[in-house]
Amino acid sequence: MRSRRLQWQEWLPWILAYVLVVSAPVFIMLVGPRPEGRPFLRDFSVAMAFCAMSIIGLQFVLTARIPSLKRPFGSDVVYYFHHRISVVAVSLVLLHVVVLAIQNTETWRLLAFWSAPTRARFAVASLVCLLALVLVSVFRKHLRMEYIAWRITHGLLAIGAAVFAMTHMQLVGIYLALPWKRVLWAAYSALWIGALAYARVVRPILMKLHPYEIETISSERGNAWTVRLSPIGHSGARFAPGQFAWITVARSPFADLEHPFSYSSSATHPEAPSFTIKASGNFTNGIPGLAVGTRVYVDGPFGAFSLDRRPGAAEFVFIAGGVGITPIMSMLRTMRDRCDRRPCTLVYAARSLEEMTFREELEGLQQDLDLQLHLVPAVAEAQWPGLRGRIDAGMLQTLAPEACQGGECEIYICGPPPMMDAMEDALVGMGVPRSCIHTERFNLA
Amino acid sequence: MRHRLATYLTWGTATLVILLSLLFAWIARTG
C-alpha cells in the first residue's frame, strides 16, 4: 500500500498544475479593466480560445520527455492524454470561430485569407496547421507516411499552429492591453519554447555527451536481435527493469530519427545495456546488418512499467506475448541478479515454441528464481504436454490462479495490443483491482 | 482501460474550460 500512496502523491501535483495553467488565462482576463459592452457570446468565444492556446502550448511540455512528468503516469498514458487533449484543443478553436460567427455573421469573411486583415490571416494559418496536424495524425497509415516523416511534419505543424495563434492573440490585443499581461503571455510562450528547446536541443546535447557503441549483435528466437551496447567514456544510464529508451543508431542525436525499445538486460548492469528488437519494419530489419562499433545514442530510461514501482509486492505474475517478453526478461534477469526470491509466474505466449525468444534462458531461470514458467504456443506438435492456443481468462485461472485473486500480487502484461486488452478485461472481470495490473503500450504515433 | 486517468482528465479539462468561459462571459457582462 505504501507504494500506491506514493504514486498518488507523485501524480496529483502534476494534474493540479496542468488544470491551473489551462484555466489561468480566464483568471488573467478577469484582472484589470475589461472592454465594456461586448456581447456575451463574443467573450465566451474569446475565453475558450485563450484556454485552447494554453492547452496547445502545454502540448510541448507533455511531449518534452521530462522524466519526472513521465515517471508517475508512464509514457503511454502521457502520449494518450496528449492525443485526446489535442482533440479538445482543436474543438475549442473551432468553437471559437463558430460562436464568433453566430454572434456576428461577418466573422466568416475573416476566413478569406487574401482579403482578411493580418490578425485574421494568422488565425487562419493557425487553424490550417491544427487541422493538418489532426489529419496527418489520424490518417498517417492511410497516407502511408513513414514514422520519421510524420514526426517531423507533426513537429513543424505544431510549432506553426502555436506561433500563428499567439501572434493572432497579440495582434487582436483585446484582454492583452495591459503591458503586464503581454509580458505574462510572453513568459507563457517562453515556457513552451523552453520545453521544445529542452526536447530538441538539451536532451540531444546530453545524448551526444554520453554516447554508446554496439558491442555485440546476437540472433534470438522469433526473428529478434539482441543489441548489446557499451558506454563510451561514461558508466551508462541507470534504469529500472521494464523501462524503455529512445535509440538513435548511426545518426546525430539532433536528427530526430529515433525509435523506442525496451531494455532486455538486467538493471544491475547499466554499464552493459541491451535491447532485444524484433525485425518487423524498415529500421528493425536493418539491425542484423549493423557493424560492431556503430555509434548509438540512448535517450532514456522512460516508462512506469517496472516491478521497482511496487517494492512492497509479495509476488508477481508476468504475461507476455511475442517480443513483449523483452521488458519482462529485464525484470527476471534483474530479480536473478538481486537474488530476489519472491514468487513469480510467467505465462508466455507466442506463435510456436521455436519462436519463443529467450526460451532456453527462461527455462534456466527456474533454477535461480522462484519462477513458475508456462509456455503457451499458439501452434504446437501433438506431443506438447502444455497448453496451446490464445491465452484467455480460463487459461489464466489455470496457470496463474494467484493473479486472479488480486491482493498482493502485481501483474505485468506486455504483448500485442489486442492481447493486452483481452488480458486486462479478463482480469478486471475476475475482480482483480486495476491498480494491480500494469501495462505499457508502444504504439505512440 | 489503463488510460482512464487520461480520459477523465481530458473530459474534466474540456468541461472546466467551457464552464469557466461561460462564467467569464457572464461576469464580463454583469460587471
Image (spheres, rainbow, N blue to C red):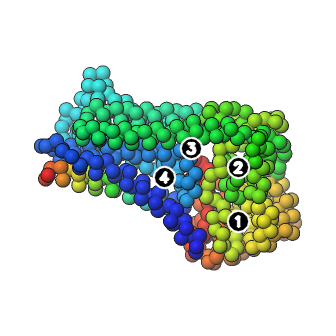
Q: Chain of mark 3?
A: A
Q: CA distance from mark 4 to mark 2?
A: 27 Å
Instruction: Classify residue A324 by image quadrant.
Output: bottom right
Q: Chain of mark 1?
A: A
Which of the two discs, 4 and 1, labels the residue nearer the N terminus? 4
Which of the two discs, 4 and 3, labels the residue nearer the N terminus? 4
- Residue type (three-letter) at the residue carrying disc 3: Ala
Q: CA distance from mark 3 to mark 2?
A: 26 Å
Label 4's element? helix
- Contact? badges 4 and 3 (CB < 8 Å): no
Residue displayed at 67% across by 64% down: A308
Which of the two discs, 1 and 2, labels the residue nearer the N terminus? 2
Pinpoint residue A9: horizontal percent, then vertical percent: 50, 65
- Residue type (three-letter) at the residue carrying disc 4: Phe
Q: How many numbered marks does the figure carry? A: 4
> Mark 2 highlights which residue?
A237
Pinpoint residue A404: horizontal percent, then vertical percent: 64, 75
Pinpoint residue A210: horizontal percent, then vertical percent: 70, 41
